[in-house]
Image (cartoon, rainbow, N blue to C red):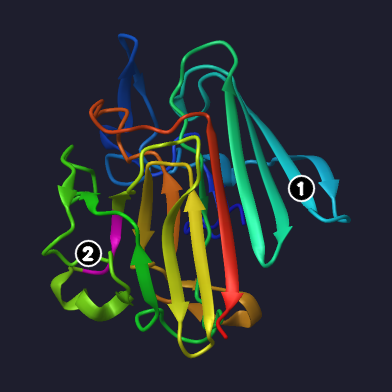
Amino acid sequence: MMNDSSSFGATVGRVGNRISGAQFTLNGTLYKLIANDGKNTLHGGPKGFSKVVWTVKKYSPEGQTPHVVFAYHSFDGEQGFPGDLRAIVVYKLLGDNKMSITMKAKALNKATPVNIINHAYWNLGGHDSGDILSEEIQIFGSHYTPVDAQLIPTGKVVTVKGTPYDFLRPRTVGSMFSKLAAGYDINYALDGSDEQKLKKAAIVHDKKSGRVMEISTNQPGVQFYTSNTLYQKGKGGFTYKPHAALCLETQGFPDSVNNPQLPFTDCESRGVLQALHAV
């Protein structure tokens, strides 16, 4: 939806997640963006990739791998970002309850940052089944990036051990909510450094329904978000409230345009989602 402020199932960019101060410097030039999250830019600005019309370049509903290809040409200066950019997103069904999402981007005339993210919300119990606090999650990241009061990374990468952010072993989403202000909205540094290969990012398990979801990616990070401020009418008129779903947004690190020590994304983001019924 064009007026959706929650990025439901959207492709967000040109740079997903947050950019501090709504600005960055690239090759000696300061670029000022449009702030839409306090003083910061979130998910590409008030009219980022989730608020524009993409072109369907190819639609192939038959065969062993049904797929659809979306394309968008982002113009020089759009939302303050430099240069023209051609973006491609491919959704493909692979069989065995697997779906792949491949995101590619090419800068056409100027250097520009790119961090395109899929912003799907998940509740494995069903969209109207209540909150996700009892769902079990395992995140394959032994480090995370601490944030300030505006959810901007401090530039540090620290261990999850001894913190409420430790999901190296499966545990329920809500098991340490009492130690958090509102819920999770944090980036994990995924284990494994080879961006040419897919690595496991997370596993989610809903015991009531028996559903299991696995996510793999070639990106360095994943944002774990528990829809802390969600309030929106959804399917069948059901109202989604805080903690009604979770997001696992594979990505380059937030605000890495202003923190060169943090890894950014490249121009090809690949991921595989597998949803299964447990036996």
Q: Is residue 272 above or below residue 73?
A: below
Image quadrant where residue 201 sits? bottom left
Q: Is residue 88 above or below residue 100?
A: above
The amino acid marked with disc number 2 is Asp
Q: Outermost residue, bottom direction? A: 208
Q: Is residue 277 left or right of residue 153?
A: right
- Distance between the alpha carbons at the discs numbered 2 and 1: 36 Å
The amino acid marked with disc number 1 is Val
Instruction: Residue at 63% x, 76% y: name it.
Output: 235
User: Which residue is identified by label 1?
Assistant: 68
Instruction: Residue at 45% x, 87% y: name it.
Output: 207
- What secondary structure do most residues of the magenta stretch adopt? loop
Q: Position of residue 47 (x, y in %)?
A: 52, 40
User: Which residue is identified by label 2?
Assistant: 166
Q: Is residue 94 left or right of residue 162?
A: right
Q: Residues within 10 Å of mark 1 (few under 14, many from 20)?
A: some
Q: Nearer the viewer, residue 242 or 158?
A: 158
The stretch of residues the image draws in magenta is 182-186
Quadrant of the snapshot with the C terminus = bottom right
Lower position in the chain sequence, tag 2 or tag 1? 1
Q: Nearer the viewer, residue 173 or 148?
A: 173
Q: Is residue 108 above or below residue 230?
A: above
Instruction: Residue at 44% x, 41% y: name it.
Output: 219
Is 148 magenta? The answer is: no
Q: Position of residue 44 (x, y in %)?
A: 45, 38
Q: Nearer the viewer, residue 216 or 259?
A: 216
Q: Position of residue 35 (x, y in %)?
A: 35, 38
